[in-house]
Image (cartoon, rainbow, N blue to C red):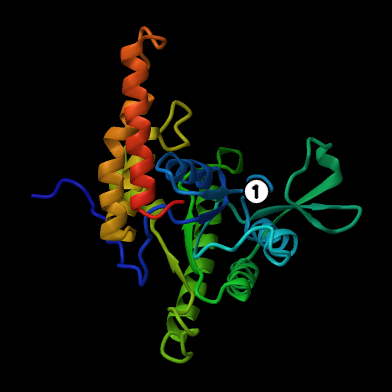
Amino acid sequence: MEFRTVVQIPKPSFQIEPLEAILFVGSCFADSIGQRFREEHFPVTINPFGTMYNPASVLHTILRLKNDKWTTGIEQPPRVAFITLGTNHIYRLKETGEIVDNCEKRPQRLFQEEELSVDECAAYLLQVVEQLHSVRADMQVVFTVSPIRYQKYGFHASQLSKATLLLAVDRITHIYSSKLTTPLPPAGGVGGEASYFPAYELVLDELRDYRFYKEDMLHPSAQAVSYIWQQLVAHYFSPRAQQFLKEWKPVKEALAHRPFHPESEEYQRFLHETKEKEAELLTRFGKT
């Protein structure tokens, strides 16, 4: 007998390779998952212009990356991008009418809070995908919705906000799944897509217990984030990437060891040998 609801995760059309560059943009949940990738030696970019919570602000980050870095060649666009959405609420500066990404601790009276509709969220997210594909045609865009609830809205309003995001993402992924039978992939690779990873459902439906939350009862605990990471690895990582993680784990643990006598000759020899193992792994799995 199964004593929990198991969330079914669709098999993606691509696989994450070891030490692959990945972009994370979105809510603080994107920070948590992106940091886990960083700990495993993936050269990730996490919210380069700050944490973004709504679809409009996510688009602002993508446009800045495209104009400031990717178009000028300062950075190369990655093959995989994770977009994590937190809310459909936006703040508009009354003086100019522009949507701001950060109120910068300015008085609340200067801003007007609004809620984006499903249509508006979908329109912003479609632009996100199109802009990403314009800089790299084979980019795989993976949407997630943060499981973090917004107590300040009230829990019912928070659920409505998440539902709006889920409906908008579903619309975008359906648009791209319907396109798969029509366009030819770019020369030398698979065409870019937009898909959904159910982090929201994993926490609310599969874990479904306050022991998987931090003390504020709103943010997922480290254990919950680790479980989501395990599901990502199992469903999105290539066999070679999973092998890298398996071999890297004891080396990472050895490097994290804090000795009583760090200056001792024995520990220095141990550290040197461990770093040699690290370098060998990075070379063998493709990082120069």
Residue at coordinates 32% horizontally, 58% vertically from top-left? 237
In the rendering, at what x and y percent does residue 90 appear? 70, 53
Residue at coordinates 84% horizontally, 37% vertically from top-left? 107
Residue at coordinates 31% horizontally, 27% vertically from top-left? 254
Foreground: 71 or 284? 284
In the rendering, at what x and y percent does residue 136 appear? 57, 72
Q: Residues within 10 Å of mark 1 (few under 14, many from 20)?
A: some
In the rendering, at what x and y percent does residue 74 appear? 69, 58
Give the side of residue 237 with respect to residue 61, left or right: left
The residue identified by callout 1 is 48
Give the side of residue 38 with respect to residue 126, left or right: left
Relative height, residue 150 to residue 145 (above, below): above
Relative height, residue 189 to residue 170 (above, below): below
Q: Residue furthest left?
A: 1
In the rendering, at what x and y percent does residue 247 appear? 26, 43
Kind of residue at badge 1 = Pro
Helix or strand or loop: what does disc 1 sit on?
A: loop
Foreground: 72 or 179? 72
Residue at coordinates 50% horizontally, 49% vertically from top-left? 43
Determine if residue 212 is in view.
Answer: no
Relative height, residue 13 to residue 78 (above, below): below
